[in-house]
Image: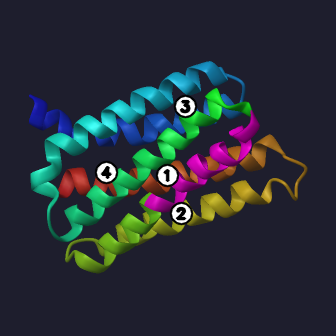
Amino acid sequence: MLRRLRENGPIILVPLAWTFVTAVHLDLASEHALFVAHLVMAVIIVVFTALSWSAMDHGVLLAWRRVLLAGLVVTLAGGVGFLVPAVATPLFTLSLAGWMLIPAAGLAYTSQHVAETPRRYLLGAVLSVLGLLVYASSSLAGGDTGVLVAGLSLVNVGQTIGIATAVFQY
């Protein structure tokens, strides 16, 4: 059962995480809940990575182990942002942008190293980067929530395409 959860869990967790971040931006969930989510995510990343360590020691899976380790760092940085208000903004920015770009790099790498459906992985990477650009452009639109949500939605769709492709193909 644990193996099935490790193999299939990300297809639920990835879109759930981005949907939750979007809910916080829409004031449908609290920042305290987001802090708790950071802690839960950090634990999940540590457990998943530890249990999968030996299986992720070469090729594309090694790249994804590195994505997880870098993701853990930016997740912890975001968590620290809740505890140290003086550095909250840069740490939240690092955490959010990190989770937009680090998986995008993993998806782009994967697209170059798999024979089956490499375009799906590349599409996921492109949508993630486009999502970051749209999200960042919201400052030009006066912080428009619709633009923020559009950016987050692009990232959500892109990364969900990538993880769904991985889960259903392997």
The answer to whether residue 80 is visible is yes
In the displayed structure image, the side of residue 168 where residue 94 appears, left or right: right
In the displayed structure image, the side of residue 166 where residue 15 appears, left or right: right
| Residue 140 placement: quadrant | bottom right
Asked if the residues shown at circle 4 and circle 1 are in contact, with their CB atoms under 8 angstroms apart, the answer is no
Amino acid carrying label 2: it is Leu
Amino acid carrying label 1: it is Val
Q: How many marks?
A: 4
Placement of 87 over or under 60, stated as above or below: above
**Where residue 136 appears, x then y in whole percent?**
73, 58
In the displayed structure image, the side of residue 81 where residue 51 appears, left or right: left
Kindly report the distance in space between the C-alpha atoms of the residues bearing marks 4 and 2. 15 Å
Looking at the image, is mark 4 or mark 1 earlier in the sequence? 1
Mark 3 — residue? 20
Q: Secondary structure at mark 3?
A: helix
The answer to whether residue 29 is visible is no
Q: Assess disc 1: are there few (<14), some (14-19) or many (≥20) residues with their C-alpha within 10 Å of its C-alpha.
A: some
Looking at the image, is mark 3 or mark 4 earlier in the sequence? 3
Q: Assess disc 3: are there few (<14), some (14-19) or many (≥20) residues with their C-alpha within 10 Å of its C-alpha.
A: some
Q: Main secondary structure of the magenta part?
A: helix
Q: Residue at x 37, y 36 (%)?
A: 13
Mark 4 — residue? 164
In the rendered structure, does residue 121 fall within the stretch colored magenta?
no
- Please provide the residue range marked out in magenta: 86-102
Asked if the residues shown at circle 2 and circle 1 are in contact, with their CB atoms under 8 angstroms apart, the answer is yes
Q: Residue at x 22, y 64 (%)?
A: 62
Mark 1 — residue? 157
Looking at the image, is mark 2 or mark 3 earlier in the sequence? 3
